[in-house]
Image (cartoon, rainbow, N blue to C red):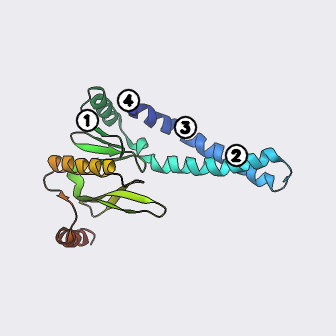
Amino acid sequence: MKLLNFKFIRDWYRKYKIYLVMFSIILILCWFYYFFEPENGILFFCGVLSVLYFGYSLFYIVSFSDFKDLDEDLVNYISDKIKRKKYKYFKNVGIIMFDDFFVYMTNGFKIVKYDELLWSYYVVGRGRYNKRTFLILYFLDGNSKYISISSREKRIVDEFEDVLQIIKKHNSTVEIGYNKEISEKMNKILKELQK
């Protein structure tokens, strides 16, 4: 199973980020020029392309900004684990689990260390436009993140359940699951942490 070449992506991001922005600006200038030359169909096409491309570039730069912070040791560690098949890959939810941390690539690229987690659970519900499944992560510093998958299929739920079990295996102090009792207890702790 072929996974991401982390070193390649990190280096590509560092090298070409500025070109993504510059190309977007050039396309946007074409869009503005179109308003002065509305009969020029090429400029209109460039304008539409500029909006799409700029949005994509901005999403890429923001979502994958953590790549620029990956040091060489971490990149080599991840690459080595992938080569030696020392990981657990959950393809449907975009999570790769290692010994000390896991990586998720669903809403960008993030590294989560097991020992930084306080509480985690999944929720099946609705997003703004469709049915979604969320993995909610609360951290010891009081912050939270979520992983969102636009599906409520059983395979997604099953993978999130497996992810939670592996998190618990690596950090027995993490609270896993959601019910009224857990929610009340953890919300008190989170309020204290956020003071």
User: SS for tag 2?
Assistant: helix
The N terminus: image quadrant: top left
Q: Which mark is residue 16?
A: 3
Q: Which of disc 3 and disc 4 is earlier in sequence?
A: 4
Q: Which of disc 3 and disc 2 is earlier in sequence?
A: 3
Q: Which mark is residue 26?
A: 2
The residue sitting at 19% across, 49% down in the picture is 165
User: SS for tag 3?
Assistant: helix
The residues bearing labels 4 and 3 have C-alpha atoms spaced at a distance of 24 Å
Query: In the rendered structure, which amino acid carries the disc numbered 3?
Result: Tyr
The residues bearing labels 1 and 4 have C-alpha atoms spaced at a distance of 13 Å
The residues bearing labels 2 and 1 have C-alpha atoms spaced at a distance of 42 Å
Mark toward the viewer: 2 or 1 = 1
The residues bearing labels 1 and 3 have C-alpha atoms spaced at a distance of 29 Å
Q: Which of disc 1 and disc 2 is earlier in sequence?
A: 2
User: SS for tag 4?
Assistant: loop
Task: Confirm or deny contact between disc 4 and disc 2 (CB under 8 A).
Answer: no
The residue sitting at 44% across, 31% down in the picture is 8
29 versus 121 height, above or below: above
- Are there few (<14), some (14-19), or many (20+) residues within 10 Å of tag 1? some
6 displayed left or right of 178? right
Query: In the rendered structure, which amino acid carries the disc numbered 2?
Result: Ile
Q: Which mark is residue 9?
A: none
The residues bearing labels 2 and 3 have C-alpha atoms spaced at a distance of 15 Å
Q: Which of disc 3 and disc 1 is earlier in sequence?
A: 3
Q: Quadrant of residue 187?
A: bottom left
The residues bearing labels 4 and 2 have C-alpha atoms spaced at a distance of 35 Å
Task: Confirm or deny contact between disc 4 and disc 3 (CB under 8 A).
Answer: no
Q: Which of disc 4 and disc 1 is earlier in sequence?
A: 4
Q: Residue 17 at x, y = what percent?
A: 54, 42
Q: Residue 145 at x, y = what percent?
A: 34, 58
